[in-house]
Structures are given as C-alpha cells and as structure tokens.
Image: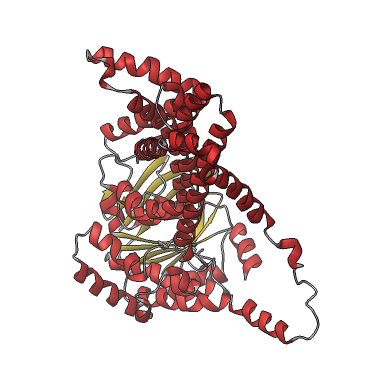
C-alpha cells in the first residue's frame, strides 16, 4: 500500500529524514515511535505530500508522490490525515467540517454528504454533535470529528500525527478507542504516537526512529521487551 | 465564564467592599464627555450661529462629493488590495503545472514591487504624480482627450491606487494570521489550494481583516481632502475657496473641521458595532 525508498527530507541545514525505506501492506497497522525531533512526523507528512521528499520516492497505492505529474489532491483524498491540533475549521459546524470535501472534491450533493457525515459520526460515537461548532466540543470530541472527517472520504490509508498529544489525559482513551476499532476493522494505518499502550494493543509493527533513520522495527512486544539496539533500549527506559 | 459569574454573585452578598473593586471615578470615561462637548460646540457654531450660515451653506455642499470619493476609492482599492494581497503570497505545489508556477512567481514579484513602491512615497506627492503625470500619459497613449478622465476620477483613481497597496498588506496579514494547520487540513482531505483558500482560509481571515480595513476606510475619508489640490470640489476645496474670497477663515475652518470630525466619529461608531457583531460568535474559539 505504501512504499518508501531512500527517503531524505532536508529543511535548509536540518536533515530531518535520512534515508528511510519502509513498506506498509494493506490492512497493516504501523506505529512509529521515537524521541521528539527524530523526524517521525516529517516522515508521516511525506506520506501524503504535505512535505516533499528531498531525495527518494514515496508511493501510495502505486502512485508516485514525487512525480510532478501526480495529481496530489487525488492521492490526498484517498489518504486520511489526523493532526495533533485537530485542525477543524472553526467557522463550520461538525457536519460542515465533514461534508466540505465530500461536496467539493467528490461532488456529493448536500443530502448524500450529510448522510455520510451521520454514519461517520456514529462510528466515532458522537452523532448528537452534528450541528455543534468545534469550539463547543472538548478536545477529545474535536479529534473524533477530525477522524470522522478523514473517514468520510473513504480513505485507503489513515495517517495519524500524534493524535492524542494535545489532549487532556482523561480524553486520550476516547480517541484511542476509536483508533483501536478502526484497526480492528482492517484499516491500513500509520500512527506516530507516544501511547505505548496503543502500540501494544493495535500495532502489527513498531518502528523506532532516531536521527531520521529507522533504528529498529518489528513485532511491538518483541521490540518493547527485547530491543536489539542500545538506542532503542535507552528510549524505552526513559518513557516506560 | 460561568465560574467568574458565580464568584461575582458570591462577592455581591459579602458585606464589605471588595478589595479589588474599581474606584468608579477613576475609570469613568471622561473623554467621551469632553469630546462630545467639543464637537457639540463646533456643531453649535456651524449650524446655529448666524455668522457661520454662509460658510456652512457653501462648504457643506461638498459633503456628498467627499463621501462619493471615499466610497468609490474604498471599493476600488479594496478590489485592488485583495488582488495584490493574495498575489503577494501566491504559492504553488511542487505538482502544480508550469503555467501556474510562472503565474504565481510573476504575481508575487509584481505585487511586491507595487506595494513597496507605493508605500515608499508620501500620499500627497503620489497624488500629484499619478493624477498629473501617469493618468495624462495613459490617456495620451490611448490617443484620447485628457478630459476623458475628469478631476474627480483622476483623484479617485490616484487614491485607489495608493490605498490598494495599503489594503493589500491588510489582506496579506489577515490570511497569514490563520494557522498553517488550516491549509494543511484542507489539503489533506483533497481540496485544492484555491478551494481551501476560499472555503477555509478566507472566511476566517475576514474577521481579522475587518478592523484594520475599517481604519483604512476612515483614512481614505480623511485623505480625500488631499484631492482638493486637484480642483476637486470636495469640502476642503470649498472651504479654501470660500475663506480666501471672504477672509472668513475662522468660520470656514470651524465648519470644515466639524464636518470631518462628525463624519469620522459616526463611521468609527458604526465600525465598532460591526466588529462587535463579527467577533461575538468567536468567543472561546481556539
């Protein structure tokens, strides 16, 4: 589903991603962990073209993102992205947020779009908030709307960029539960997170990144309990 | 909000005076009374004092012209400012087609040149330059009579060209005040840059733009007085004409100042109301 080869990303002098090869198969849940500033978010953002690779290639469902001729909007419409800061549109209602791209990109009419929004809101457990504005919701509810917004586009892959890092502790679970359910339904997911509980419960593969490179990867329990690399051990010692 | 309310009510039942209660005489807005007195006195002279009758009749005839200049110049400079402001920050993706990239590059650089040049010259010299050099050059070049564009329109066009540059910066500031994540969220669900701009960024930027735009509207009203140098018969020109013919300087300029200050105060009041309405449903927003 996703094929990354020799990916480098430089921001001026900062070399954020230094040669990453990675494959994600359909239905796989990959959790990316690593110290802050290690390049894990940049890697994720390269997967839907929010950042452009300096060198190397990123393919999503057979489409090469680094090719200038690629219709990046079409790729993004099939790739859900959930942000740390939710990034809901404040002047639109929950329904407006979810239906915006359905109407503008997929050309659904108002009624169809509203029906899809309702289905997705039920999936994330807050159908009653359809007419609320983002500011009237808690952080956890906002993030669930953001997930519903991405799911509404019927994506082939969901990318999560530290989806619970901006949440108060008591709201983390409601968001993780939605993500767990999604993983169980077979969604292909790439998740950057510090939630090791989620990694343990849902991940098919754990990828540890440091200094822009993949240090170690494998079955989450294996990597947690028996890390092969010193840097991995050090990292888990600090956070667990 | 709710918590503060509750505390205030609790405090109200407290017998002694709250330690942090404001001393009302210190916070009272005296300036409103003083200003009202001042403007009221000027208005009394201009409207009810017989000695000012002729000055008022002669000069107030230009109010409508002053307002027409202001409205036209604001409308044109706003359109120009939106084009220039968005042009100044035009961006493309690495996947954009070549013509779009060329257009964005040209747009950014032309807009920047325009804005920096116009803002680098004081308004009065620019009005002379535009109305007496550039616009005649253009009519000559087009091979039409210089009077095709009369003084009124030369003045309006000059003022619009100038304020277009100032408003462009307001528009740019408004758009850039919207967090980057909003554009990224729009793009991530598959909207194009233009679609995201129109449906996500601009509606939010509007709120940030309204107050400084209001300031520019008032500034245009005040600077329309500079067009009096072009033989545009606005209130300032009429006041100068009447005073130099009759030597009634006091009467002329009391009336003139009264007209401007009352127009500006009424406009400021309306703009404050508009801002309140625009920001009311914004409270508690992230």
**Residue B46 x %, y %:** 53, 42
**Residue B128 x %, y %:** 44, 19
A168 on left or right of B10: left
Residue A188 visible in image: yes
- For the C terminus of chain A, the image quarter is bottom right
Q: How many marks?
A: 0
The residue depicted at 20 percent of the width and 71 percent of the height is A111
Q: Is residue A113 above or below residue B256?
A: below
Q: Is residue A84 above or below residue A49?
A: below
B214 or A88: nearer the eye?
B214
B171 or A235: nearer the eye?
B171
**Residue B53 x %, y %:** 49, 38
Displayed quadrant of residue A69? top left
- For the N terminus of chain A, the image quarter is bottom left
Residue B179 visible in image: no
The residue depicted at 52 percent of the width and 26 percent of the height is B243
B250 or B214: nearer the eye?
B250
**Residue B166 x %, y %:** 47, 35
The residue depicted at 75 percent of the width and 68 percent of the height is B22
The residue depicted at 52 percent of the width and 24 percent of the height is B246
Q: Is residue A54 above or below residue A174?
A: above
A61 on left or right of A228: left
Q: Is residue B236 above or below residue A231?
A: above
């Amino acid at each position: 589903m996703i094929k990354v080869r020799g990916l480098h990303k430089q921001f001026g002098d900062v070399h954020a991603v230094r040669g990453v090869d990675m494959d994600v198969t359909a239905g796989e849940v990959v959790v990316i962990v690593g110290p802050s500033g290690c390049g894990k978010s940049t890697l994720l953002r390269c997967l839907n073209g929010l950042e452009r690779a300096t060198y190397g290639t990123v393919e999503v469902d057979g489409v090469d993102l680094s090719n200038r001729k690629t219709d990046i909007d079409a790729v993004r419409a099939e790739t859900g992205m959930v942000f740390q800061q939710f990034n809901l549109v404040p002047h639109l209602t929950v329904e407006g947020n979810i239906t915006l791209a359905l109407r503008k990109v997929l050309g659904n009419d108002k009624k169809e779009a509203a029906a899809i929004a309702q289905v997705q809101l039920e999936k994330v457990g807050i159908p009653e908030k359809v007419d609320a504005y983002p500011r009237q919701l808690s952080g956890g509810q906002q993030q669930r709307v953001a997930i519903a917004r991405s799911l509404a586009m019927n994506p082939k892959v969901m990318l999560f960029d530290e989806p619970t890092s901006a949440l108060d502790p008591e709201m983390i679970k409601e968001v993780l539960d939605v993500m767990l359910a999604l993983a169980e339904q077979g969604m292909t997911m790439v998740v950057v997170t510090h939630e090791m509980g989620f990694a343990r419960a849902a991940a098919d593969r754990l990828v540890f990144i440091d200094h822009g490179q993949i240090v170690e990867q494998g079955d989450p329990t294996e990597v947690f309990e028996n890390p092969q690399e010193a840097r991995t051990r050090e990292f888990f010692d600090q956070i667990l | 909000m709710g918590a503060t309310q509750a505390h205030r009510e609790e405090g109200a039942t407290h017998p002694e005076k709250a330690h942090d209660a404001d001393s009302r005489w210190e916070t009272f807005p005296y300036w409103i009374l003083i200003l009202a007195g001042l403007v009221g006195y000027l208005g009394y002279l201009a409207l009810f004092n017989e000695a000012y009758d002729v000055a008022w009749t002669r000069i107030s005839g230009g109010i409508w012209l002053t307002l027409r200049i202001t409205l036209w110049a604001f409308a044109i400079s706003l359109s120009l400012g939106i084009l220039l402001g968005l042009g100044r920050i035009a961006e493309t993706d690495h996947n954009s087609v070549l013509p779009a990239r060329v257009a964005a590059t040209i747009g950014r650089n032309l807009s920047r040149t325009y804005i920096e040049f116009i803002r680098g010259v004081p308004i009065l010299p620019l009005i002379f330059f535009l109305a007496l050099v550039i616009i005649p050059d253009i009519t000559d070049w087009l091979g039409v009579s210089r009077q095709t564009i009369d003084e009124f329109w030369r003045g309006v066009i000059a003022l619009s060209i100038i304020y277009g540059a100032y408003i462009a910066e307001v528009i740019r500031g408004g758009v850039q005040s919207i967090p980057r994540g909003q554009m990224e969220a729009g793009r991530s669900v598959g909207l194009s840059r233009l679609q995201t701009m129109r449906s996500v960024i601009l509606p939010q930027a509007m709120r940030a733009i309204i107050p400084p735009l209001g300031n520019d509207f008032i500034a245009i009203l005040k600077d329309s007085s500079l067009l009096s140098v072009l033989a545009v018969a606005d209130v300032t020109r009429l006041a100068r004409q009447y005073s130099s013919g009759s030597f009634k300087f006091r009467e002329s300029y009391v009336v003139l100042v009264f007209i401007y200050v009352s127009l500006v105060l009424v406009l400021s009041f309306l703009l404050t109301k508009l801002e309140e309405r625009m920001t009311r449903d914004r409270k508690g927003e992230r």
